[in-house]
Amino acid sequence: MATAREWLVCWMRPLFAYAMTLTRDRERAQDLVQECAARALAAERLPAAERARGRWLFRTLRHCHVDGVRAERRRREAEPSVARAAAGWALGQGAAPEEEIALRQALRRLPPAQYEVILLVDLQGYGYREAAATLALPVGTVMSRLARARRALLGALEPGVLSQGGDRE
């Protein structure tokens, strides 16, 4: 009999295809499959029959998706306070007006999943575990989303737009 990890590896492609159907976004689909795999590995009992395990995995993936949609809805409802927090962060750092504009535009362009992680960790000061618990995600998912968000922000901001350590000429 295969271990849970070996069994799970066999289902990754079909799960990813289903996640792509649900999300229509590659990164979100990868995060969804990762969340489903984490739940499967953490489960105390799995169905004994192979076919039943497959159905269980697809159902778990769908539940992960629904949980994510609900979390996104809650995030959108809190958007005005999120926008104020991001603006306050830029203003609180003594940023020049062009820096504030560039930062706000770059933040607005982030996908919602990345925006909420960067908001919690970088803007609100949450630790990885605290952000993961808040978003009901594995710590690894929070870390990967944060890394992608930071890369996207760095790519969106032209070199030299944000001054380094306040040394402006």
Image (cartoon, helix red, strand yellow):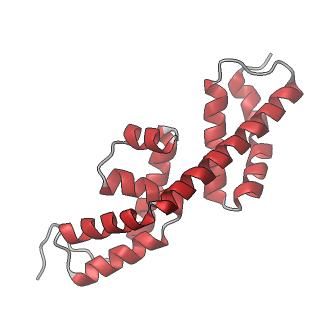
**x and y percentages locating residue 32 in the rendered image:** 64, 47
Q: Foreground: 22 or 83?
A: 83
| In this picture, residue 164 sits left or right of residue 135 | left
Q: Is residue 42 above or below residue 165?
A: above
Kindly identify the residue that appears in the image at 62 percent across and 41 percent down.
Answer: 34
Q: Which residue is drawn at 82% across and 18% down?
A: 48
Residue 110, x across and y down, in percent: 48, 67
Image quadrant where one finds the N terminus = top right
The location of residue 99, given as percent across then percent down, is 27, 78
Quarter of the rendering containing residue 25: bottom right
Image quarter in which the C terminus is found: bottom left
The residue lying toward the viewer, choosing from 144 and 96, is: 96
Residue 66 percent coordinates (x, y): 67, 48
Whether residue 155 is visible here, answered yes or no, is no
Residue at horizontal 25 percent and vertical 67 percent from the top: 88
27 relative to 55 in the view: left or right:
left
User: Is residue 151 in sight in this rendering?
Assistant: yes
Residue pictured at 40% horizontal, 61% vertical: 150
Q: In which quarter of the image is residue 100?
A: bottom left
Numbered-mark total: 0
Does residue 115 appear left or right of residue 40 in this picture? left
Left/right of residue 144 with respect to residue 90 in the rendered view: right
Identity of the residue furthest to the top in this view: 1
